[in-house]
Image (spheres, rainbow, N blue to C red):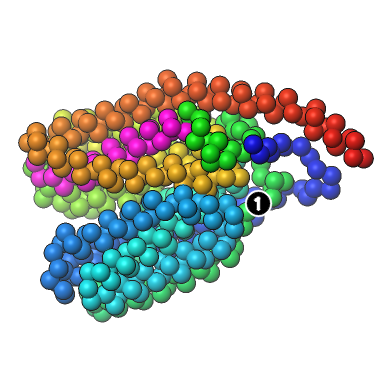
Amino acid sequence: MTHSIATPAAGSRAPVSDTVRWTQIVAGIVCMVAAANIQYAWTLFVPEIQATHNWTRASIQTAFTIFVVVQTWLTPIEGYFIDRYGPRVIVAFGGLMTGLAWIVNSYAESLAILYVGSAIGGLGVGCVYATCVNNALKWFPDKRGLAVGLTAGGYGAGSALTILPISAMIASSGYQATFFWFGLIQGAVIFAAAWALRTPAKEEVKESTKVAQTRRDYTLNEALRTPVFWLLLAMFICTVTGGLMAVAQLGVIAHDLGVKETPVSVLGITMAALPFALMLDRIMNGISRPLFGFISDHIGREATMFIAFSLEGIGIIMLSRFGHDPMMFLILSGMVFLAWGEVYSLFSATSADTFGTKHAGKIYGVLYCAKGVAALLVPLGNLLMEATGTWATVLYVTAAMDLTAALLAILVLKPMLVRHHARNRALTEAEIPEGAAIQSATH
């Protein structure tokens, strides 16, 4: 097992300034914002593609499924290359692939070519997302939740900056030209920002004094042999699946509650309840990740998980009970979205706290496959609705998954991590005299 013992080295440099560290986060956020449109602006292109080629909506949406599957399931492989070659090369490659994906889409005259473009996009965005999150983990052990939350939030809310320009260009120049030029611009932005990224040296990071963190760097095989890893994976699957199911059924829920087209006014803005709720999703998704990440840096990951997962579960239950009121539907759906987006900051931060950062790309890459499992489980929500004849059953199941994960966080994960860190401290302390003896013998 590889060890990383924080002992001062002779002639080591002074700790790097916070300006340098935050520059890494800003560069990562720029990359994430530029990559976000492939996922979040896709819905704007679907009607135009259908009108142009007369392909079925289902066949077009298969391209999006391919994107999600490739982005998610290739993450462990991308993690291997991240740990081996560092962030700069991997993000630059991801930028090229991200730009190429939309350029391919702009020339797609068949579904096969559209699917190829989606697969290229999944590879590109996967490289950008996994690498930028991994880099944030390594630079900010002392503010890991906040740093990862800000980085992931750039992806969750990044498309808000370009939704209107993309919509306007589709209307004025067509979807093909929009794919081409925005693909070119987004790929170029990611490629340029990538060269600002680098891995920190050991003396350039500050350890956390509030959150327990391992001083041993686990390999992927070692992490897979720990019960902590499998508990985190199970909790990740529960929360991601529950959130995705709730989001996927939101339109049906709004229709069944009779509020889908009901206008709602907030701060002088009047919109139908469903599109208002979907817009709120983008905002809450962006806020959620840094907010709960920041909280977790101060009160611990497990306590933050308990609060967030409980909030989501309770919000879903209340939505099923009180969502027939348009304003309550908007408020409660916003509550659900706020409590869901944080999973992408909390689990990555907890993984690095638990297993170290040397092999963080590979380890979190496997954990991130929870999203891929969730993508495969989400269709079961439709089957459950058809079998029971009501969306309420789906909501109660998703709420149960969230509340189960909340209880696991505080009742099982917390004591398990206490034992995990105590065992690592004992092993590390036992090896210090040996290391000191070796050092003194060589001088």
Residue drawn 36% across the image and 69% down it: 101
In the displayed structure image, the side of residue 209 where residue 313 appears, left or right: left
Q: In the image, which residues are magenta? A: 229-256
**Residue 58 versus residue 305: which sits nearer the camera?**
58
- Residue ID at (66%, 39%): 2
Q: Main secondary structure of the magenta part?
A: helix
Q: Is residue 206 visible?
A: yes
- Picture coordinates of residue 443 (x, y %)? 92, 40
Residue type marked 1: Pro
Q: Is residue 56 above or below residue 141?
A: below
Q: Is residue 53 left or right of residue 165?
A: left
Q: Is residue 212 magenta?
A: no
Horizontal relation, residue 301 to residue 158: left or right? right
Left or right for 2, reference 137: right
Q: Is residue 232 magenta?
A: yes
Q: Is residue 75 positioned above or below 184 on the image? A: above
Residue positioned 50% across, 43% down in the render: 363
Q: List the residue tagged with mark 1.
A: 200
Q: Could you classify mark 1 by the number of other residues whose Cα lies within 10 Å: few (under 14), some (14-19), or many (20 or more)?
A: some
Q: Position of residue 413 (x, y in %)?
A: 46, 25
Which is more toward the observer, 373 or 354? Answer: 373
Image quadrant where one finds the N terminus: top right
> Does any portion of residue 23 appear in the rendered image?
no
